[in-house]
Amino acid sequence: MSRSRLAPALAAAATLLTGCGIDASGVLDGGDAPTGVAPGVTLYFVDDRGELRGQLTQSSRLGDVTNAVDLLLRIGDGSSDGLRSDLPRVESLGPTVTVAGTVLTVNVPLARRDVGPLGVDQLVCTALGVRTQSGDTGVTHAVVSFTHGGSTEPGTCPAP
Amino acid sequence: MRPRGLRVRLVLAFVLVTVIGAVAAAWASYGSARGSMVDEAQQRATDEIRRRVAAVTADLTYPPDQGALDRLRAAVGAPALVTYGSLSSAEGTGLGLLTGELRAEVRDREALVFQRVTSDEGPRLLVGTPVMRTSVDGARAPSGIEVYAVRDLTPTQQRIDASAEAAVRTSALALPLAIVLALFAAGGVLRPVRELGGTARRLADGDLDARLRVRGSDELAELSATFNHMAAELQDSVDELRRMEADSRRFVADVSHELRTPLTTLTAVAEVLEGEAQRMTPDARESTLLAVEETRKLTRLVEDLIEVSRFDSGTASLRREQVWVRRAVEDCLRARGLLDQVELDAPDDVTAVLDRRRLDVLVANLVGNAFTHGRPPVLVRLRADDEQVEVTVVDHGPGLPEGGRHRVFERFYKADAARTRSEGSGLGLALALENARLHGGDVVAGDEPGAGARFVATLRRFPREDT
């Protein structure tokens, strides 16, 4: 009884002891690739018909939401290529951006009354666009918070 | 080589099961531990690379120049390789492990991929990923930048080895425990078996009261109960047989006693008739003498039967007295008119403390047997030492029948089946043996070389001190 049945058990134990280690594998899927490179940042302006249009600013890099919003505010209400901004020009302190859950909040150094609905959409679209380009799918809504006059409801970008 | 004994086999089986169980458990836990440790290491490495790349892409010049590639490569951490078209930035050893297969998969899948390889330096994890461009509407496309990194899996390998060693150690620890448990279990199983064997031996030795203790309600208890039942049945059967045998012996004794009184009368009448026989006609005389002879035989048979019954009922007693053995033997032979026909070889001065009547019966039966079944001359030899007296009777007949050494002492044993009617009662040798045994002796039958049958009766010369 003993020998004939003990031998396979010992062989199994030996295999176990010698079979330690990490074996080679084929090429396996590790999930989504990182993203976030872009030739520039897309800012949203208002066209002749009063609709939002994205325009690529050749900055050679995407940058973050704060940079994009800051750039948008510094351009101000000047216009080019038939596009105009519905936002007042800001020279003072730049905007700040915070994220809580799925909602991104843009704090702009403006009063509520200085900004129209199109201006708010410009801010929301620009912020969410940068967020999307940087690979963040967690944020879905944006809020514009004003120095005076409170803040908007969480919204999404109406532009196509 | 088969292991002997239930205990050894039980222990071996127990240890074998334990070893197989421990090995299987260790193997399974080791396998799952190895899998999860490798998975965890891979997950950590790929997440780290994805996180590091994503942390710098937003500030990376695009399309990238050599400086941008260097920054990205530095962010990923060596050993790493970053390519964009014909530009590339590399640092660290082991980048030669990066296979064309992996690069092709990076381009085809447009996703982060990895591959485990074994190198001379140990196990390595190869990670490759394209950096994607995402448009504002979420559409992704390859940017042309590809990042490759090589990560060392040796620490993971060491952790896996440590866990394997721990598994082996645990298994080894289980082994002595298994042996101890097996010995306990074997003891528990084997003790009732040993008791069963002991009780069976006592039964075989004649102790019909031997029983097992029935404990619990398992198969062994059931076996014990069955065994006890068997013993009880056996005892009942033996008791029944003994009772029946006692009944039949009592019947024989009763019949013999009942026959004795009429036989006494019959014998007296026969003797009277014998005295008158001379005056009868020849025919009548012959019949009368035949009747007288048969009456004497019948009387002898009944007396022998009564004697045998006494032995059977255990009421035969020994009345020892000082006996001159030679004189007693001579008296015995003389009383039966055989003194002249027997050659007596006996020293004069042998005395013993025996039952004179029983010695007489013993010698008479042995000598009578020699004359009826053997042929003269018959030799009676008497010898004695400090312990015992030995009486040997030798005849010159054909010797003992085939296989009759013990059977001649059986009651009514017929050596020759054709001879239905023996000269004696058929009880003579049986009585001789019983008488010898009552004296603490024996009778042994055999053949005397150059003569016929030989019967050697040995009797204890003096009573034992304690009787």
Image (tube, grey):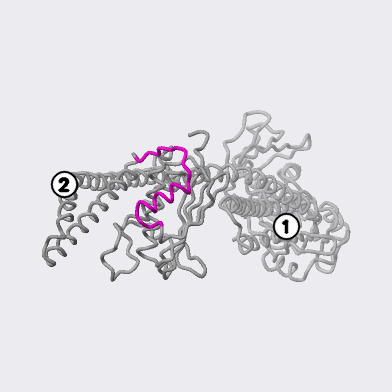
Q: Mark 1 falls on what kind of element?
A: helix
Residue B12 appears in the figure: yes
Q: Tell me the magenta residue range.
A: B316-339
In the rendered image, which residue does mark 1 sit on?
A17
Q: Nearer the viewer, residue B36 or B392?
A: B392
Seen at 63% across and 49% down, the residue is: A137
- What kind of residue is marked 1? Leu
Seen at 16% across and 60% down, the residue is: B278
Q: Quadrant of residue B370?
A: bottom left
Residue A48 appears in the figure: no
A144 displayed left or right of B344? right
- What kind of residue is marked 2? Thr
Q: What is the x, y in percent for residue B179?
A: 63, 46
Q: Was residue B226 drawn as part of the magenta stretch in this picture?
A: no
Seen at 17% across and 53% down, the residue is: B270
In the rendered image, which residue does mark 2 sit on?
B265
Q: Quadrant of residue A120?
A: top right
Q: What is the x, y in percent for residue B57?
A: 77, 53
Q: What is the x, y in percent for residue B49?
A: 76, 53
Q: Mark 2 falls on what kind of element?
A: helix
- C-alpha gap between disc 2 and disc 1: 106 Å
Placement of A89 over or under A60, stated as above or below: above
Instruction: Tell me which chain the residue with mark 1 is part of.
Output: A
Q: Tags 2 and 1 in contact by the CB under 8 Å rule?
A: no
Q: Quadrant of residue B231?
A: top left
